[in-house]
Amino acid sequence: MGYTGQQMRALVPAPAPAALTAPGAADPATPPVSELLAAVHRLEASVASVIRGKPQAIRLAVTTLLARGHLLIEDIPGVGKTTLARSLAAAVGGTFRRIQFTSDLLPSDITGVSIYDPDDRSFELRKGPIFANIVLADEINRTTPRTQSALLEAMSEGHVSIDDVTHALPPPFMVLATQNPVEHFGTYPLPESQMDRFLLRIHLGYPDRQVERELLRDRGGGDPVAALSAVIDHDHLRAAQDAVERVRVDDALVDYAMSVVEDSRKNAAIAVGVSTRGALAWYRAAQAHAFADGRDYAVPDDLKRLAVPALAHRVTLPAAHESLGRARVEAERAIAEIVARVPVPT
């Protein structure tokens, strides 16, 4: 059953009393909003120095980070998916781990394992690579669904369970996953429950001719990511994430979002529409997008621009397609048509 706009508003956390334009009103230690925005823009500029000609993809990646979400980068090999993830991690600082997903990877290779110490007669936890601030799940669809599921608890709740013991992950925590099209050899489709944990799904595509020419001229050797350093500390990042939650979303925009969500559930081109989790993710992403634009309120364009990246990977089509790429195109087209059809509040 679909949720009404009033019910949806009840699910969404109420904005804090302090407006975004009144920084530090609630906590004197909170950095000014202008300082937070400057740090966010430095973050975007740092990543853009490596990923050239893709400002929209960079903005969506930063939007995901500000919304405390996780990002799926889906595209053909060799267009910069891994480089984008590494660049963002380098600019954020903190701990970074890369997991190369393969067909023989086990869940314990991600979360860790308890090792028995015969001298102490006790078990010692050997933490896996998931215990990091930024985790790159490289080629996530090259491993089995059983191993993919090891990420679900971490992405949803910020902790993992090992031998019936719950271990919290260090904040901030973000998973950036790259995925190759399923028609490539040795790949497995991500289950719906895994796809639903990603706040946004983005694509990079080939760079423009001039940008690619510059890359060929400038990168004769060396790794450009290695030259990046952290441009935002964790205190400022957490403060920016807190400020995102105070971005105001008008009731009319909530009703607009619910109209789009309900249309996806009734649309003949879609077998399973957007879930309530998906609607909440879209809402949080719109708040983060507005903050990155320097506003303490969301506008219709925030929701419209994020509709496809936030919703298309959460719907199921009525018939199987020959490839992941074809299914992606059809799902994105269906969401785009719904957004174009639903009246925008004025």
Image (cartoon, helix red, strand yellow):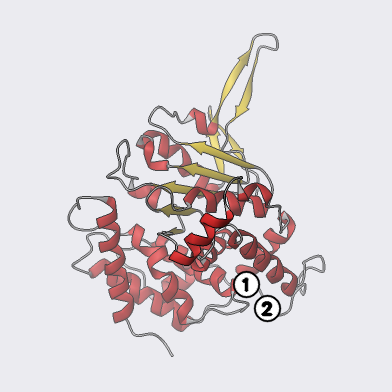
Q: Percent from the top left, x then y, of residue 219?
A: 57, 52
Alpha carbon distance from label 1 to label 2: 7 Å
Query: Which residue is rendered at x = 73% and y = 56% of the image?
Result: 233
Q: Percent from the top left, x then y, of residue 75?
A: 38, 53
Disc on res. 19: 2
Categorize mark 1 by other alpha carbons within 10 Å: few (<14), some (14-19), many (20+). many
| Three-letter residue code for mark 1 | Arg
Determine which residue is flagged by label 1: 246
Q: Secondary structure at mark 1?
A: loop
| Three-letter residue code for mark 2 | Ala
Query: Relative to residue 313, is residue 24 drawn left or right?
Result: right
| Above or below 290: residue 313 | above
Who is closer to the viewer here, 255 or 326? 326
Q: Is residue 208 visible?
A: no
Quarter of the image for the N terminus: give it. bottom left
Q: Percent from the top left, x then y, of residue 343?
A: 34, 85
Who is closer to the viewer here, 168 or 211? 211
Query: Relative to residue 106, is residue 129 drawn left or right?
Result: right
In terms of image quadrants, where is residue 337?
bottom left
| Above or below 40: residue 165 | above
| Above or below 189: residue 104 | above
Is there CB contact under 8 Å for labels 1 and 2?
yes
Q: Which is more N-terminal, label 2 or label 1?
A: 2
In terms of image quadrants, where is residue 65?
bottom right
Q: Percent from the top left, x then y, of residue 239?
A: 70, 63
In the picture as drawn, the residue positioned furthest to the right comes out as 28
Query: Which residue is rendered at x = 54% and y = 66% of the image?
Result: 59
In the picture as drawn, the residue positioned furthest to the bottom comes out as 346
